[in-house]
Amino acid sequence: MSTYELTTPLKKEDIKKLAIGDVVYLSGIIYTARDEAHVHILELDSRNEELPFDLDGAAIYHCGPLMVKEDEGKWKAVAAGPTTSSRMSDMTPKLLERHAVRALIGKGGMQGVGDALKEECVYLAYTGGCAVLAAGSIKKVRSVHWPQLGMPEAVWELEVERFGPLVVGIDVHGNDLFEKVRKDALSAFCQLR
């Protein structure tokens, strides 16, 4: 296992060297996107409409942050822990067909997305329950897109510094840490019986 410090926007070369179990810290811009944001992105894509943010080389964080408005109308993240990524599994292949997203961040892994991620994107796992730790890595809330979706479902453009630790859960070579753990656990259980 290795540790990497990466900066967005990410290039293919940045993620090709990553293997499951590696630890990553991200700096630069990341975008939050949960269920409703994914639906909205795909709707705009289906109408060939431009997004108000650029997903080329982007990192999408499956997160519904808690924000507070400070003086001068600026936002600050109070809590920004990961949400369960499997809810976005069905929408991810279509999203990756249209956009060169290089990293997805969340918790719990994703099912059925290995082929869509292959050679193009990695899945980075963030430990659940770390909402305050995650918020501490957010240096600035640059913008909010689609606030009409509500605070947790809007797309928040976040400037982060050493965001993590993130563990490579699915790499660009098709290896899935979550599947490996499931198989190893099942094998160990069968040996005990």
Image (cartoon, grey):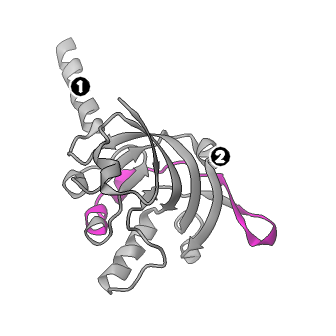
First in sequence: mark 2 vs mark 1: 2
Name the spot of residue 172 as percent of width and height, x first.
Answer: 25, 48
Q: Nearer the viewer, residue 55 or 109?
A: 55
- Residue 184's place in the image compared with 44, above or below, is above
Q: Which residue was labeled with disc 1?
A: 184
Q: Is residue 157 left or right of residue 110?
A: right
Question: What's the magenta region?
Answer: 68-95
Residues marked 2 and 1 touching at CB (< 8 Å): no
Q: Is residue 193 visible?
A: no
The image shows a total of numbered marks equal to 2
The residue most toward the front is 13
Name the spot of residue 48 as percent of width and height, x first.
Answer: 32, 86
Q: Quadrant of residue 131?
A: top right
Disc 2 packing (10 Å; few <14; some 14–19; many ≥20): some
Name the spot of residue 191 as percent of width and height, x first.
Answer: 18, 14
Residue for point 28% across, 47% down: 16
Q: Is residue 125 left or right of residue 45?
A: right
Q: Quadrant of the N terminus?
A: top left
Residue for point 54% across, 69% down: 154
Q: Is residue 95 visible?
A: yes
Disc sitting over residue 136 in the figure: 2
Residue for point 65% across, 59% down: 140
From the viewer's perspective, is the residue at label 2 or at label 1 nearer?
Answer: 2
Residue for point 60% across, 70% down: 143
Disc sitting over residue 169 in the figure: none
Q: Is residue 17 left or right of residue 127?
A: left
Identify the secondary structure beneath mark 2.
helix
Label 2 and label 1: CA atoms lie apart by 34 Å
Q: Is residue 94 magenta?
A: yes
